[in-house]
Image: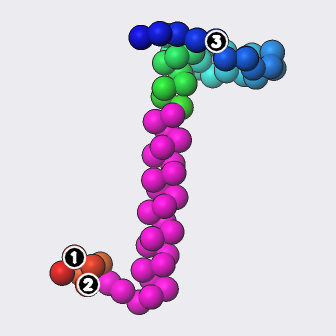
Amino acid sequence: MGMTTVAVSRDLRAKLMELKISENARSFDELLRRMLVIYKKYRFLEASMKVRKRIHELGISLEELTE
């Protein structure tokens, strides 16, 4: 797998380093991969909550959706 450089401020790099240490990540690559997984789960949960809210607003039951 090829590697590249990403420019970030010194302040952000320091915060990422703190997070890397606190999360026991072996590298920034590992830390960022974990962060991406968490972000994707968060976005999925967000979308799920919107769907549930809309289903409730429309008065549709889960049983009706699965029939």
Secondary structure of the residue carrying tag 2 is: helix
Residue located farthest toward the left when viewing the structure as drawn = 67
Near-viewer residue (18 or 30): 30
Q: Amino acid at mark 3?
A: Thr
Q: Point out residue 47 in the picture as x, y percentages from the top left corner.
A: 48, 61
| Neighbourhood count class around disc 2 (C-alpha, 10 Å): few under 14, some 14–19, many 20 upward | few
Q: Provide the residue designation for mark 2.
A: 64
Q: Tag 1 or tag 3, which sits nearer the N-term?
A: 3
Q: Nearer the viewer, residue 19 or 55?
A: 55
Is 28 covered by the magenta stretch?
no
Residue 66, label in figure: 1
Magenta extent: 36-61
Q: Residue at x 80, y 19 (%)?
A: 9
- Please give the label number shown on residue 5: 3
Res 24 visible:
no
Residue 35's label in the rendered image is none
> Percent x, y for residue 10?
81, 15
Q: Residue at x 47, y 10 (%)?
A: 2
**What is the C-alpha distance between the residues marked 3 and 1?**
47 Å
Determine which quarter of the picture holds residue 4.
top right
For label 1, count other residues whose C-alpha is less than 10 Å away and answer few (under 14), some (14-19) or many (20+).
Answer: few
Q: Badges 2 and 1: C-beta atoms under 8 Å apart?
A: yes
> Is 8 displayed left or right of 47 in the figure?
right
What is the quadrant of the C terminus in the image? bottom left
* Main SS, magenta residues: helix
Task: Identify residue type, mark 1.
Answer: Thr
Q: Quadrant of the N terminus?
A: top left
Q: Residues within 10 Å of mark 3 (few under 14, many from 20)?
A: few
Mark count: 3
Q: Residue at x 44, y 63 (%)?
A: 48
Label 3: state its secondary structure. loop
